[in-house]
Amino acid sequence: MNYHSAENVSRPADVDFKKCIHDNHGKGDDYSVALLSWNGKEYFAVRWNIRGDEKDDPEKQNGEMCLGFPSSHGLPTWFEIPEDLIDSDSEVYRKMVGAKKSF
């Protein structure tokens, strides 16, 4: 399926793409992780390259570009990963790891 590559996602406005960290296309859940700069701050961001409903859309299966998620005004958009989610010293991170171990 066709999707917007990480390098071509330019929302939020004025975002400066630095580097694609991970593109999982064709390996199950299609998502990308990137390092971006926006408003003078570097951060990691994530997006689904192909929305769940697009996987079943015949037009998308036949080559029409997938929008992915999130999107804004019909344009693919990045979602900033809150620092707490990736900082192994944060309380939120420890809670997530603890919750996963309890299952």
Image (cartoon, helix red, strand yellow):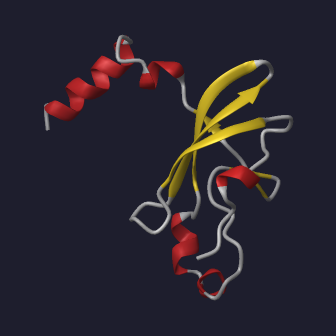
Residue 16 on image: x %, y %: 78, 35
Measuring 47% from the left and 57% from the top, which residue is drawn there?
A: 24
Measuring 40% from the left and 65% from the top, which residue is drawn there?
A: 27
Assign the N terminus to one quadrant of the image: bottom right
Residue 9: x percent and y percent? 74, 51
For residue 86, above or below residue 47: above
Give 42 or 62, whichever is nearer the viewer. 42
Dividing the picture into quadrants, the one containing residue 13 is: top right
Which residue is at a point 73% across and 28% down the rendered structure image?
37
**Residue closer to the observer: 68 or 21:** 21
Q: Quadrant of residue 33?
A: top right
Residue in the image at 35% along x and 17% along y = 88
Q: Say if 67 sits above or below 65 in the image.
A: above
Residue 69 appears left or right of 93: right
Quadrant assignment for the C terminus: top left
Q: Is residue 65 above or below residue 4?
A: below
Residue 80 pos. (x, y %): 62, 32
